[in-house]
Image: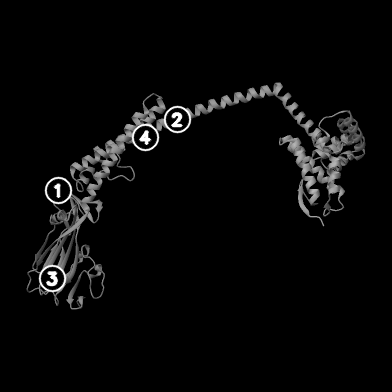
Amino acid sequence: MKKTFTINISGTVFHIEEDAYEVLQKYLVNLKNHFGTSEEGKEILADIESRIAEIFIEKSESKQAVITIELVNEAITIMGSPEDFNDEDEAESDEQTQLTEEAKRKRRLYRDPDHRVIGGVCGGMGAYFNMDPVVLRIIFVVLFFVTASAAFLAYIILWIAVPKAKNTAQRLEMRGQEATVKNIEKSIKEEMNDVKESFKKFKQSETYDKGKRNMEAAGDATYSLLKVLLRVAVIVIGVFLIISGFLGLLGFVLTSVVGHSFVSDWPLVWSPDVQVPGFMSHFVEPGVFTFGMILIGILVGIPLLAMLFVGTKLVFRYKSNNTAIGLTMVGVWLVALVTLLAVSVGQIGNYKNRSSFTETKTISCDSCSTLYLNLGEDKYENYAREDFNIDNMKMAVVDGEEVLLGQVKLDIEKSGNDEFAILVKKTSRGKTRELAKESSEHIIYNYYQKDSTLNFDPYFILAKDEKWRGQEIYITVKVPEGKAVFLNDNMVKIINDIENVSNTWDGDMVGKTWVMKPEGLTLKE
């Protein structure tokens, strides 16, 4: 038993014996070496393989039959080998004539796709009967009128029934020529030569020259149009940069000098009544603020100036040392940025540490069994700004001067003795704990006693020239066991999470009397 292989030839699968496979492979390699790897050679090889597959199918008893070495040798004999047709001589011519005479008996009818007007039927019949296809077309037209369109029906039937010559082997068979290697090569070379000759004639024709001139003219027009559009786009971008840079510089200068009055209607901009220098003076030193504004001016101004510079250069196209100017502006901008960051870090350091200062005072009221807590008059109600609120700090403008107000927080706890007492804890931040404590001592807060009533100011204020450092005040009223406090309704503004036995919310504790019992602050029945 011989070993078999499964191969694919021109899209058809065959089973072939090992010795037959070796002979066929050697034959195909010789053909490939002869015709080369050009496009023309590849097309010849493809048609040869297609013809070999047809021979195997014709000579085999069934599609499942194994291809033997005898069948391979027979196919090679039919197709011919490269050594058989290196040069054409008289002997080959006589042999070709003999093959041609024999092949005439083996013609097959195909539709000719290379000489078709509609479906290639007349072209294929002309090749089959060795007639001029034009004569056949005339006959079909005449029969169309004579036979009342029966010829048209016959043409349609032939168009459907007759296969199209798809490859070189079928086109040779259509003309009565044997599909040998020599004929396939000759046919493809003739087709290639026809294509080259047609293209050569086309390049030499007046139509080609006229089309080439039209294409060159269209290309030049397109280039000119794109050049004009690009120039217009550059000018539009330049004008946009000029306008944006100019308006940006103007708005920045007016914002800094006038205090936002020019841009008061712009979104995301502060109210025009808030003056930047006056506002910032509550947070940083005046000298630091001025220096910072200069740095910000550089950081904002240089990009805006760059926009003006680039815009004018795009529009007016003047020459300048762009590299030197650009590097200088970038260098100044980077120095300003680093300096501003360093100054900002230094100012942020003012909030690094927190410290407190506590004042304790005993309430002189020996006969008081109930202490009444009341919120004093809000002296700044008509002066406070509604658009300024930072960490429960408000700003009031009194006689043209800005005053920072802070809300106090009040709690009630059990006293350690038999006397009422008030503990006022003032806290603040600073660069060091000492500076933070000093800042807390400068917080101004007042409350006063009248008989059994304590009146608390609703706000604490910062001393003049004192900077905001997150100041806060916590007030604790110490109540002895067995005594009570009464919370006036207005105390709801400053009481802060007072613990009581019934867990009553701060807002519900006002207007009531609360007794300090061992278990805690209890509502008086």
Residue corresponding to mark 1: 465
Disc 3 crowd rating (10 Å Cα; few below 14, some 14-19, many 20+) is many
Q: Image height check: is 251 above or below 71?
A: above
- Asked which quadrant contains residue 249, the reply is top left
Q: Which of the numbered marks, if any, corresponds to residue 234?
A: 2
Mark nearer the N terminus (2 vs 3)? 2
In front: label 3 or label 1: 1
Cβ–Cβ under 8 Å for marks 3 and 1: no
- Asked which quadrant contains residue 506, the reply is bottom left
Q: Image height check: is 333 above or below 377?
A: above
Mark nearer the N terminus (3 vs 1)? 3
Q: CA distance from mark 2 to mark 3?
A: 80 Å
Q: CA distance from mark 1 to mark 4?
A: 40 Å
- Asked which quadrant contains residue 325, the reply is top left
Cβ–Cβ under 8 Å for marks 1 and 2: no
Mark nearer the N terminus (1 vs 4)? 4
In this view, the residue in front, 25 or 243, is 25
Q: CA distance from mark 1 to mark 2?
A: 54 Å
**Quadrant into which the C terminus falls:** bottom left
Q: Amino acid at mark 4?
A: Ser
